[in-house]
Image (cartoon, rainbow, N blue to C red):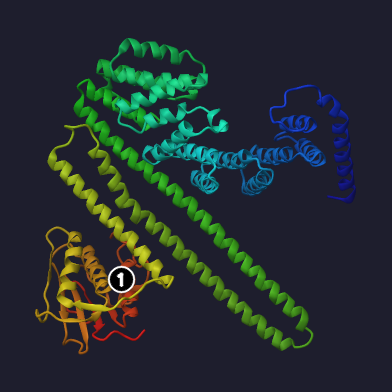
Amino acid sequence: MTSSDSFRGGCLRIFAILAMVLLCPALLKAEDNPLGIDKTCYSLYKETEKQLGKDGFDTASELLRLSALEKKDGKALVIYHLEVLKNYLARPASEDNDARVDEARENLKQAALENDTPVYFYWAYQLSQEYYTRRGESYRAMLLILEMQEHAIAEKDAYGIWTSSKYLADIYIRHNDYVSAKPHIKQALQLYNTSTDPAIKRESPTRLYCDLADTYPIASDSVRINVMLGWENAKSHMDSLRCRYYRLRLAALDDNQSEYLRLRQLCTSDPDFPTITSDAELFFSLIDATRDGSILQREEDIYKLSMVREMKVIANLCENRGYKEFAFTVEKKLVNIMESLISDSNNSRISELDVSMGKAALNAELASKEQLISKISRFLAVFLGIVLLVTAFFSFYHIRQLKKANKRVLLADAAKTRFVQNMSHEVRTPLNAIVGFSQLLTLPDGSLSSEEKEEFSGYIVNNTKMLTMLLDDILNASAMDKGEYRITYEEGEKNFMCEAAITSAEHRLQPGVRMYYAPEDPAPFSFRTDPRRVQQILINLLTNSCKHTPKGEIVLSSSLSENPGFVTFSVTDTGSGVPPEQAEKIFERFTKLDEFVQGTGLGLSICRDIASRMGARVELDVKHEGPGARFVFILPLTPPEK
């Protein structure tokens, strides 16, 4: 832009401001002022509101800011910052606009705290989370509301806790996750029923009561009670319409045809009804189909409903009208749908987290490089004409260091990405199994036999143990990295430690595989060590063999003669074995020779880290002959000095 263009633009801005000032008398005509701010500021606020998203916004908002400062009206200044945030929210989403939204939110929060207007502090969070929700970044929106809730709890602010609980519940419900939404709904309702805060009491709890009804089994007394409470507390036409729709569903489940048809007519004739549900036409036609039997040919239409809750209503109606086998098929498919929704939600959160981590790592790397380049430039400016050879040497040295640093950044980023992807898979697998089989166990009585229930319970227990083991691996690795891992020495008996390790690991055996303890000398032998850490290493080695041994046996043994002065524990299996060239690689973190085997790739690395802290060694016996692999744990009889 040329200087003449800048001058012309400045003149136009000044003329626009003068024009607005001249118009102020017209803007100051008598009108309501619900914000309770200065009359001039309120008129300027109304004009700023009209200019949201338009070219005239900057001029209008600047007049509001100047007037607020002149009148020393703190609340009007807060409203100015609110309008700036709303203007950015009205713009098309982009990374640049995201940064402006975040900056405007922080400015509004700061102004609200300085002028003691907490409602606007929380409004900054609400508007921002709605912006990111529209962009499909629900995890980012959730983090904002969690931050808002943390502040409200610290300040003991009932309104902030109430608002954050509502929004957290709404985020979970949009993902059909009623289990996670339920505690937030209950917290919000408890606040509403016990608080005397007028800001809370002005709002309606009807939506919360209806959402809470959806967290209970279809047509249960709890559903009916909460729908009735929602009806009694309705404060608007939309509240009444929502409750009418929920009563319609209950009438259909109760086979009260006359009440169902009456409520259906009231709902469908209301122009606002599509805002309650977008699937009304399909949903009502499926209800009709359960009465004439045509539902048996419309299974796929059931899964076209957008809310799982409505699918469950249809499944329940089918069971009530005698189509039990069909209802059971639909319920099983709904379990898969719920599992898929939870999995997709977790993937979305992990993806958003991965992108966020990637941006942070990139920004840190760029900042580091900029600082380094700045130092090199200053160094060259001082010494370039004095010692050219030395300058060239140091430049070469710094470039090499920069390349090495860049290589480390790339390796760390690759490790981070591999870890996030690996944990996404490893945690999701047992978690999805737990959710899926738990859903099956909640099916109506008679749907599953006792044997099936016992089998499904076993799957849940086994996958829970698997999930616990994965999390323990991560926590152990983190504790060792932070230097918080402690070794405590006391008397330990080798046979007891081995037998305890087998008991802890034997549930991981694959069908048909035998595991047993075969000591060189069965006589008891005690020595000074950390028994819990010894057992942890043995359990990890046994668990590793269980994963790679589909048939045959796993033998744990102990020897005092194989390495004099040491106790040598060994785990020998008949599994897939380890190539000699991979003998050291398998002890690296996140390394798995078989990506299809469950695990984090941390177990063997943790074994070696713990052993090194005890003056011991864990290694693969590369001289082992025969099928499978042999791992040895060589532990000194005398603990090393600290």
Q: Amino acid at mark 1?
A: Leu
- Dividing the picture into quadrants, the one containing residue 626 is bottom left
Taking the view exactly as shown, the residue that stands out farthest to the left is: 522
Taking the view exactly as shown, the residue that stands out farthest to the bottom is: 564
Relative depth, front residue between 98 and 122: 122
Above/below status of 109 relative to 382: above
Quarter of the picture holding the C terminus: bottom left
Relative depth, front residue between 522 and 89: 522
Residue 412: image x %, image y %? 48, 67
Other-residue count near label 1 (Cα within 10 Å), few / some / many at <14 / 14–19 / ≥20: many
Give the residue displayed 26% in from the left and 42% down from the top: 438
- Disc 1 designates what residue? 604
Above/below status of 7 relative to 332: below
On screen, residue 365 versus residue 266, left or right, reads right
Give the residue displayed 66% in from the left and 70% down from the top: 371
- Dividing the picture into quadrants, the one containing residue 12 is top right
Give the residue displayed 17% in from the left and 36% down from the top: 448
For label 1, the SS is helix
Residue 3 appears in the figure: yes
Relative depth, front residue between 228 and 613: 228
On screen, residue 553 versus residue 270, left or right, reads left
Residue 342: image x %, image y %? 37, 43
Above/below status of 402 relative to 61: below
On screen, residue 171 versus residue 86, left or right, reads left
Residue 75: image x %, image y %? 71, 38
Residue 622 appears in the figure: no
